[in-house]
Image (tube, coloured by chain):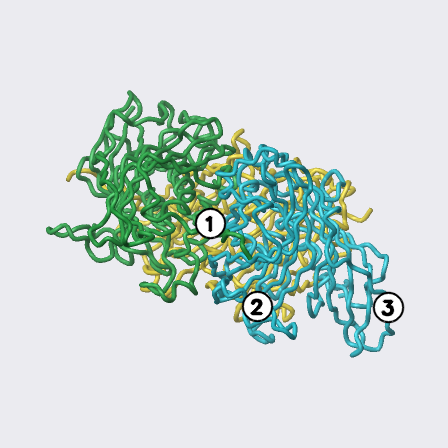
Chain colours: A cyan, B green, C yellow
């Protein structure tokens, strides 16, 4: 038997060379079936992602994937190359969701290594990548920076030259793109009359509702995006892990919380940018997700369209009206799952 | 902080004014993905909703949503406006499912308040609405009357003038519409040779098979229809409720029982009217649904098409061949979940 | 009450007459929704079944159903006629998956009885059928032989003339059909550079990853294919059974294992033939499936396309790198679920 082992060992810290581009498998056609799945798994109700009629009247090209859905698809593809040997998913920054993904479009993903920094323990290092999602016409539909802590293959391998990319705290409002004019916006069908001008910086919104996540649900969602990280699927293997059970993919938390956020942000359905994201604590099957939001900033984009910069906080098994977040020392409160900072388009007063 | 709370408090009894029309969010495009979901979640096997070829040969315009699927979509939209503060879902009547919903159609929903009656306790009242589902061409595809018991916002608010609509015990056969000619009906592909003439009024049919419902399944189904009533999703919040756990949406019971009814009613796949419906007792995850039917009436519609009026009874964790129903005093037997009275189209003898 | 019972009693051993053809209900249109389901339920990542672009560049006509998906659809239709009264599913042979099933195609199924043999106990017999899946143009898309042990209706009925069909141990490579030229094959997008020439006969591949199967997942999958065998769905009824709980449909095991096999067989996504299949032991919800493969044979089909004959072994709750299979006496090792022998297309070196 001389054949080389065929299964994918994943990349280790030493394999990430700044400047290298990784082409990720598997390209995926985003069908109408995928859109139905995203709705059925998350409870998404934002009108422009539910009705082709509403979408067109709002200025979108037709029935599109929710931008977070597109994000999860692109992210899922990167897992076998970026995070198979990752110890921790440290953060996201500078995410831009700037082109609609119509039913029928095919997305592929690639990542450029933009930074590396070995940790002082000599066993792990941090890798920064900029990942792009590209459609079948070669157009970039989204991009984001992500950094992860990855195991070294060999603790004795020398540390690479340290490159730490400069990342913006938030995407500037002037860079936002991909929003429609929103000249026509059927408010009754959207579920709310609230426009940009109704929201105040500093305002907190209690999204009230809760959603309990089952093992079958998060597994189906995660496979939908072709994210096959074993921690989400292998109960037998996870018995020996730190948590002793399957971890839920962080994207499930983001999308569940965003869907709950409909109750109070009905007209802010389209995410334009992801400024930052932190998975504060893990979610497990049987836990119930709640969410609240804070308005961090506002921007006027056109005469009829604006944007809200929002902090979305997901908490588990507690009243989101308590607005649990951080203490004075910056330590997250018990039960906080997610701290997610993003821009969303919203119609202006007319 | 002066901004108005943004989340939806729902309507209370005082908010329902007879004659008012409520436009419900969120319109929904019914994609081929939705059709696959309905099949995968319910086990639906009626041939005209499974095969585009069969549908066209039977005289339907193509692959359509099962009428109950369309009903659940329309119903789901009404929840945030009608039943967010409801104490009980009391019944349905005069439901007409008279136009096909093709893959690609977009449904929106609106309801007119047609009756109000305060209860003697002064804390709640009954509200009657007629809800319509309308497609993207403005055509009504279905309508039904539903009545619910709703909390008052303020026990001291005065009782409104009592208006109780007169409702038919059943949709008359002469009003049935939306059925195809059924001139060509590939019986072998449909799974049975039984036609209108084979069924006798009073005949009871044991549908034999059982289906156990899991938390993930009913949650996914209920979100598919964008019904977000929190009792179905929030295990943490439900701990303090009467049942201590999530309740399964009644529409899941209806569709599960109807799909089981294939075994004995293979050619009666198309529901034309809902005469009455009562959710007798709640279903919880882990329970197994069984079903039996009784032929209540028959009607000849054309030379080749007829209709059966059927009582569909869903029971849990028991042999449906026992035909459990009501005792002499009209009290439902233990384990009865659903009492559902409807008309379905069926081919005639040829 | 004189009406005949309407529910399907299924066929008993006496009902199977060699030469008879059974037309199975229910034809099914395979929509884009079905394709999304197959991906989301199995974790399928083979590029030609994920991306319409990749499929076309590889020479397929567009986005197609995975051949196993088509197999499960056809198989599901046969259950009410073939195996409602079956005691055991004994095996498959001579399966040919030779025509693409495009999104939008409608599949129907029919079976010819090709063999019968009463067992010595006089209570059961073995029935062999050749089942064909046919599309809406009347083209055969797949066929296979299956044999099952079925109960007799009456132990006193005489034994039929014994007919035992001769079945090939494997489909000959010269009979393989339905593969594209694979002249263009975007290897980076497919996830691996391994071609026919990289695999050696006798080589074993550890597919590493594991997938835990939940009740909701296998039930949804099995309903997707319209397989309604009650052992998969009726927890209440199964309490009195040998296992005391729901059994998972064997097709779920096959597809889960094949999806895990992506890790090491990335370019061998298209199954061309099923040589043999044995469900060695049952899978239950909560179990974790792992898989390994052995290369049994290789074939050159064209200048650019070849085929691997593979043994796919699924095991539960154990390291697939132990390659558990059979002992010297031919007895399967503890935890082996499936022994599946098939041909898959793979690009050749270029």
Q: Chain of mark 1?
A: B
Left or right: residue C307 compared with residue B120:
right
| Residue that label 1 marks | B223
Badge nearest the viewer, 2 or 1: 1
Q: In the displayed structure, would residue B325 be above or below residue A244?
A: above
| Residue that label 3 marks | A162
| Numbered tag placed on residue A220 in the rendering | none
Where residue C297 appears, as percent x and y from the top left, is 69, 54
Where residue B289 appears, as percent x and y from the top left, is 32, 53
Q: Are marks 2 and 1 on the same chain?
A: no
Q: Secondary structure at mark 3?
A: loop
Identify the residue at image location x=64%, y=62%.
A229
Q: In the displayed structure, would residue C183 be above or below residue A342?
A: above
Contact between marks 3 and 2 (CB within 8 A): the answer is no
Q: In the displayed structure, would residue B290 be above or below residue C214?
A: above
Q: CA distance from mark 2 to mark 1?
A: 46 Å
Q: Are marks 3 and 2 on the same chain?
A: no
Where residue C233 appears, as percent x and y from the top left, is 39, 55
Q: Residues within 10 Å of mark 2 (few under 14, many from 20)?
A: few
């Amino acid at each position: 038997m001389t054949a080389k082992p065929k299964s994918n060992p994943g990349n280790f810290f030493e394999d990430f060379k700044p400047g290298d581009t990784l082409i990720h498998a598997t390209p995926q056609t985003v069908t109408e079936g995928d859109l139905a799945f995203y709705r059925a798994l998350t409870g998404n109700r934002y009108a422009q992602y539910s009705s082709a009629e509403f979408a067109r009247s709002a200025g979108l090209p037709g029935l599109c994937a929710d931008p977070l859905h597109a994000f999860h698809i692109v992210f899922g593809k990167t897992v076998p190359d970026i995070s198979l040997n990752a110890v921790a998913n440290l953060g996201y920054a500078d995410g831009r969701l700037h082109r609609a993904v119509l039913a029928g479009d095919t997305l592929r993903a690639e990542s450029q290594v933009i930074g590396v920094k070995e940790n002082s323990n000599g066993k792990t290092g941090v890798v920064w990548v900029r990942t792009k999602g590209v459609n079948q016409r070669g157009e970039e539909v989204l991009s984001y920076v992500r950094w992860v802590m990855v195991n070294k293959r060999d603790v004795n391998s020398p540390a690479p030259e340290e490159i730490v990319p400069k990342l913006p705290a938030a995407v500037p409002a002037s860079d936002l793109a991909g929003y429609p004019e929103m000249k026509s916006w059927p408010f009754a069908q959207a579920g709310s009359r609230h426009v940009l001008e109704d929201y105040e910086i500093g305002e907190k919104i209690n999204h009230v509702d809760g959603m309990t996540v089952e093992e079958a649900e998060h597994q189906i969602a995660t496979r939908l995006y072709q994210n096959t990280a074993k921690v989400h699927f292998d109960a037998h293997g996870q018995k020996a892990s730190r948590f002793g059970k399957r971890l839920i993919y962080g994207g499930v938390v983001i999308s569940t919380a965003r869907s709950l956020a409909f109750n109070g942000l009905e007209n802010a359905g389209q995410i334009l940018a992801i400024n930052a994201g932190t998975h504060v604590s893990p979610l497990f099957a049987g836990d119930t997700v709640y969410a609240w939001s804070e308005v961090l900033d506002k921007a006027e984009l056109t005469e009829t369209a604006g944007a809200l910069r929002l902090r979305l906080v997901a908490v588990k098994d507690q009243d989101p009206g308590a607005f649990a977040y951080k203490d004075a020392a910056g330590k997250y409160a018990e039960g906080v799952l997610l701290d997610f900072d993003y821009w969303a388009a919203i119609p202006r007063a007319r």
